[in-house]
Image (tube, grey):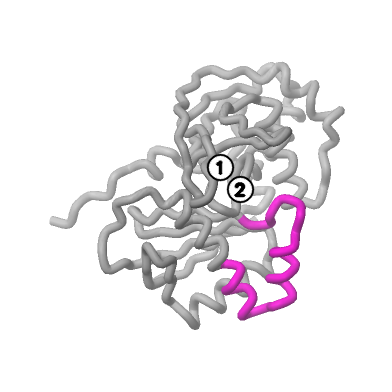
Amino acid sequence: MYRLCLKVDSPAPFRGNPVGVLSRRFHAFVLKALQRESPELSKELHDRRDRQVFSTHLMLKKGEIRIHTPDREVVSCLQRHFLREAEIDLLDWRGTVREVHCQTFDPAWIDERFSAAFTLHFLTPTTFYQRNNYYPLPELKRLFSSAAKAGEIVTGRRVEWETLEPLIYPVRIEDLHVRTERVRFGEFNIIGFKGRMAMSLKALPEESQRMMWRLLAYGSLMGFGYKTAWGLGQTLLDPLEDARAFFQTPKAPA
């Protein structure tokens, strides 16, 4: 599992909401960048009917863009593109890539960070799509179903619903603070939720705890729910990653 982190500079500070039309344009920008490096790969991803193999997270106020994917070829193509062409033009926002970093999340590292008690921080609006309707609530079955799909993309191994469902019932929600937020994609809108949810797996056997932890880890990296390639469902799992460090406000230069 890879995280491609782009440090970007922009002529003016970004003050709007990057999730919506802008993040949809960035998804198209990524596909176009991949097309320049590998037309076959770009077409494969563009025509893909299943969940996309990469997600995007525009953090323009931090001067950072993240792309998550388990596909090494996607990472390699994007690295080559941004090292050769540093400009990103999304019409309403333009930036220049000054640094490109790649972080690897291997299974051993994910297992080392295991905790039976954790918090999911839903950083961008998250929603689930079912029967032609949006479901903007962190309902556990939908959450773990999405995590299992992410896990299958990353590992190539499927967890059958008959195995997963009985393990969801003992999962406890310890604390929940969420609010809904409307996302505008131009010709249509989506309602999602943001906030945090503290959970516990302690009622499960240890082996099952670790399996559920891995699924949530992959879900948090790939994003939960609908349109993660357009920037929805981006999530931080603490303590897989340090929420305090993520939310810390950078100190102003003296």
Q: Quadrant of the N terminus?
A: bottom right
Residue 247, x across and y down, in percent: 37, 41
The reply to whether the magenta stretch includes residue 112 is no
Write down the region rendered in magenta.
30-54
Q: In the displayed structure, does residue 163 sit left or right of residue 78? A: right
Report how many numbered discs are placed on residues in the image. 2
Of residues 19 and 55, the one drawn nearer to the viewer in this rendering: 19
Query: Residue at 54% of width from left, 77% of height from top?
Result: 81
Residue type at mark 1: give it.
Gly
Above or below for 193 versus 84? above
Residue type at mark 2: give it.
Lys
The reply to whether the magenta stretch includes residue 53 is yes
- In this view, the residue farthest toward the bottom is 84
Q: In the displayed structure, does residue 244 sit left or right of residue 178? A: left
Q: Do the CB atoms of the residues marked 2 and 1 lie less than 8 Å apart?
A: yes
Q: Earlier in the sequence, mark 2 or mark 1?
A: 2
Using the rendered view, name the quadrant where residue 225 is placed.
Answer: top right
Q: Which mark is residue 213?
A: none
Residue 211, x across and y down, in percent: 74, 35
Query: Residue at 50% of width from left, 19% of height from top?
Result: 175
Query: Residue at 42% of width from left, 75% of height from top?
Result: 87
Q: Where does label 2 land, which residue?
A: 227
Above or below for 152 versus 181? below
Q: Where does label 1 land, which residue?
A: 233
Residue 181, x across and y down, in percent: 45, 34
Provide the secondary structure element on which disc 2 rests: loop
